[in-house]
Image (cartoon, rainbow, N blue to C red):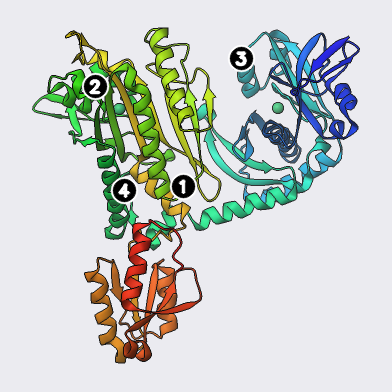
Amino acid sequence: MAKVILPDGTVIEAPEGSTVQDFALKIGPGLARVAIAAEINGELADISTPVNGEVNLKIITARDEQGLDIIRHSCGHIMAEAICSIWPEAKLVYGPTVRDGFYYDIGLAQAITPEDFSKIEAKMKEIIKADKPFERIELSRQDALGRVSGSEYKTDNVERAQGDVLSFYSQGDFEDLCRGPHVPSTKKIDPKAIKIMSVAGAYWHGDASKQMLQRVYGTAWTSKKDLNAYLTRLEEAKKRDHRVLGKQMELFSFHNEGPGFAFLHPKGMVIWNETIDYWRSVHKKYEYGEIKTPIILDEGLWKKSGHWDNYKENMYFTSVDETNYAIKPMNCPGGLLVYKANKHSYREFPIRMAELGLVHRYEASGQLHGLVRVRQFTQDDAHIFCMPDQIESEIIGVIELVQELYSAFGFKDYHIELSTKPEKHIGSDEIWDTATGALRRALEAKGLDFQINEGDGAFYGPKIDFHIEDCLQRSWQLGTIQLDFSMPERFELVYTDKDNTEKTPVMIHRAILGSLERFMGILIEHYGGAMPLWLAPEQVRVLPISDKTADYGNQINDALKAAGFRSSLDLSPEKIGAKIAKAHGEKVGYMLVAGPQEAETGTVSVRMRGCKDNKTVKIDEFIAIAKQKIADKAVELEF
Ligand SMILES: [Zn+2]
Ligand SMILES: [Zn+2]
């Protein structure tokens, strides 16, 4: 008998060779209906796979993340069939899943345009309704090559595929080379929950010297409701696009004279400086010293640090007085030189050195994206030098700093990943165990959930990554804490230990906000430009109803400025309704309407951004309330 062990420990038996589907039926007909694939001993498989001997089995349904991925991948095959039936001369290249969907690269002389999408979708729906089973066949590499002969792309795919046995999947007459697994039949896909999204040019193998293909993107969900929610999220993201808001709000610009380098305007600098002021105050509290190191440094330094061998293609260079220099892509070597400038004793440890370091990293122009992907940015870097037995408490300190910073900016949801020793690494197993254990214990001490990425650490040490989630449930990796067993030795860093011998210190690299430019882009999108009061470029605008109250308006504006607010006065001849609408559009926090009645009583009528109600309060009272909002870093403006 074949025996399967389910995730909850339940054991089920059936005759040898029974398929996963047979086992699903034994568990329950409901499950058998929704089963779309399986995990057998940790490996994904079709539900038609026969089971022999004893295995661990997990039935995958559309509710599982892997299930949705399999649906999308199957949908990729269906889209490929649809395209081939519309354009029989189309050549299929490669069709993986991506976040929220899938794509297929197509070789076709005729351009596929958005006008063709509904035609492709209609054909896909036909294929889905035809209920064609996905069937797997396995061939030797030799036979697989024979089967795809004549197709340049598929021959290339077979040659690149690993293993001696290759698989093909067919649905009806359509066949494609594929590892699988797939849903059992095309009908398992909800025809109302699919959509072709876009088409773009893509070079074969991403190589600009190779031919240009057409990459058709699609999406698939488990229900029409999920598809619609996704489309709404996309719409919302478009409205919040920081590139659009940045222009509208006059925060920053980009120019051909410096591709990938952001130009920050006065209003953008307000957000920038408030962020940095706060960052500095928190670092002071956590006892960091701040340093500043040059951006242009001798080429030899980068050879020593290893950047020359591993990162050269991403670096900028210059030469002066016949000496070659590199523009720093990272701050670490500069920080190491600061450490080496003095002798150090264990008594000074831990030494925490923070640097808002300006770095340059070359990115292909196609990768650039507003502030989020740039070629020049400021990293909120720091390096901590300590002894091995101080690692855990130092990591705890960094985690607390991370929590304090993220929550101040309104990010409450984040997830954490711990990456451990990779196959290729330097340093003894002992130091890896000590360091990884310290990272793990620090996370546990703070009661944090974390995911372990086994073998995913850098070759020079384990690390912790922090990913925040924005209001559109998009995840952004921001912070990282990285242990380094390599640099201190490369740079011969030492300290004098208790026993008077010289030892190599432990080095921790850490960044919390990551790139400040990127963080600003994320903030703008997270808040849709409506920044919390403490970050808002314009916090208050005074709106006199007419010329008659212009003087009173002026008095209020002066009082606000004296109290430290970023305020302005709108003396334009517009009607009050138009003034309010304009201030709303410019995302001003508070609008203070000043009419004759307010002038008489020393009050203001307060309108809050995003709110329709007015509240009349004395000017001193308003100042006290708004000051408290700033001190609390409050996101809500209402009072
Ligand atoms: Zn496939
Ligand atoms: Zn570093």
Q: Amino acid at mark 1?
A: Phe
What separation in Å lies between label 1 and label 4 (alpha carbons)? 24 Å
Whether residue 330 is visible: no
Q: Which mark is residue 262?
A: 4
Residue 309 versus residue 630: which sits nearer the camera? 630
Location of the N terminus (image quadrant): top right
Location of the C terminus (image quadrant): bottom left
Where residue 336 sits, quadrant-wise, is top left
| Nearer to us: label 2 or label 3 | 2
From the top left corner, tell me how far across and down residue 343 is, in percent. Answer: 13, 19
Earlier in the chain: of badge 4 and badge 3, it is: 3
Q: Residues within 10 Å of mark 2 (few under 14, many from 20)?
A: many
Query: Mark 2 = which residue?
Result: 302
What separation in Å lies between label 4 and label 3 (alpha carbons)? 43 Å
Q: Amino acid at mark 3?
A: Glu
Disc 3 vs disc 1: Cβ atoms closer than 8 Å? no
Q: Which mark is residue 411?
A: 1
What separation in Å lies between label 2 and label 1 (alpha carbons)? 36 Å
From the top left corner, tell me how far across and down residue 119 is, in percent. Answer: 73, 48
From the top left corner, tell me how far across and down residue 125 is, in percent. Answer: 79, 44
What separation in Å lies between label 2 and label 3 (alpha carbons)? 38 Å
Disc 1 vs disc 4: Cβ atoms closer than 8 Å? no
Mark 3 C-beta closer than 8 Å to ligand 1: no
Earlier in the chain: of badge 3 and badge 1, it is: 3
**In the structure shown, which secondary structural element does the residue marked by tag 1 occupy?**
loop
